Structure formats: structure tokens, C-alpha cells
Image (spheres, helix red, strand yellow):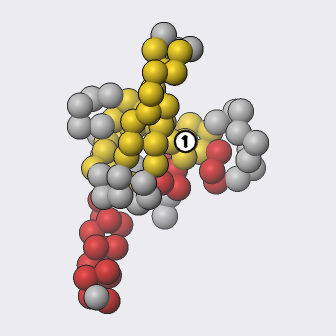
């Protein structure tokens, strides 16, 4: 299920794969990276189709704008997130199988 079809502003999302994003200063100068981890809770802001994506006809061109616990906003492909309900179901499934 796609989080962009079911989420509204401020809905809780969970990250399902570790990833890093570059941090920029003044929109041009990369000053480092921020890491996100599996199970980390973030908040949906909105979604958009990346016009520069080489996968313009692919689901990876749809981006989620999200907010972390500190209020900072970032963007990443929709495939890195699940809704709170989907996360609970994943956790239950894993617990039941282990």
C-alpha cells in the first residue's frame, strides 16, 4: 500500500529501510548527511512526483516530504515508508514468525 494514497498531513509513518540523505546549507553546499533507521517514526507532510527522476513512469519517482521529531523536513522516495497500521502489522507478523 502506498503511503501517499492513504496519508494526511501529520500522519505517523515508519521507515522500513536504513537510508541517509545529504544536508545542504544555502541550498548548494553539502555539509553532511543525516541517517534514518528502520523503525524510526516520522510525520507525513505531503507528496509529489519528482520531475527530474529518471524513473518518471515508476513508483520510485513519487516522493514523500516528511518531518522528523525535531521538526526538520526531508524528502525521500515513497518506497521507504509504511503507515502506522502497516508497521504494527509488520511487527506482529515478525513476532508471530520468530
Q: Nearer the viewer, residue 27 or 79?
A: 27
Give residue 73's quadrant in the image.
top left
Residue at 41% from the left image edge and 60% from the top image edge: 16
> For the image shown, how many numbered marks are present on the structure?
1
Indicate whether 83 appears above or below 22. Answer: below
Q: Which residue is mark 1?
A: 63
Q: Tag 1's secondary structure?
A: strand
Q: Nearer the viewer, residue 84 or 96?
A: 96
* Residue 2 at x, y percent in the picture: 50, 58
Residue at 42% from the left image edge and 54% from the top image edge: 18
Residue that lies at the very extreme toward the front in this rendered image:
32
* Residue 76 at x, y percent in the picture: 51, 42
Q: Nearer the viewer, residue 23 or 97?
A: 23
Q: Quadrant of the C terminus?
A: bottom left
Q: Is residue 45 visible?
A: no
Q: Is residue 97 visible?
A: yes
Residue that lies at the very extreme toward the bottom in this rendered image:
97
Indicate whether 53 appears above or below 84. Answer: above
* Residue 97 at x, y percent in the picture: 31, 89
At label 1, counting other C-alpha atoms closer than 10 Å, the crowd grade (few under 14, some 14-19, many 20 or more) is many
| Left or right: where 72 falls relative to 49 | left
Residue at 27% from the left image edge and 69% from the top image edge: 88
Q: Nearer the viewer, residue 7 or 87?
A: 87
* Residue 90 at x, y percent in the picture: 34, 73
Residue at 71% from the left image edge and 33% from the top image edge: 52
Residue that lies at the very extreme toward the top in this rendered image:
26
Amino acid at each position: 500500500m502506498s503511503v501517499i494514497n492513504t496519508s494526511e498531513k501529520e500522519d505517523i509513518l515508519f521507515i522500513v529501510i536504513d537510508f541517509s540523505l545529504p544536508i545542504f546549507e544555502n541550498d548548494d553546499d553539502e555539509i553532511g548527511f543525516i541517517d534514518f533507521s528502520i523503525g524510526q517514526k516520522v510525520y507525513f507532510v505531503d507528496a509529489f512526483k519528482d520531475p527530474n527522476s529518471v524513473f518518471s513512469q515508476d513508483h520510485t519517482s513519487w516522493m514523500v516530504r516528511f518531518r522528523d521529531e525535531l521538526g526538520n523536513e526531508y524528502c525521500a522516495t515513497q518506497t521507504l515508508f509504511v503507515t502506522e497500521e502497516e508497521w504494527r502489522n509488520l511487527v506482529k507478523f515478525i513476532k508471530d514468525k520468530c
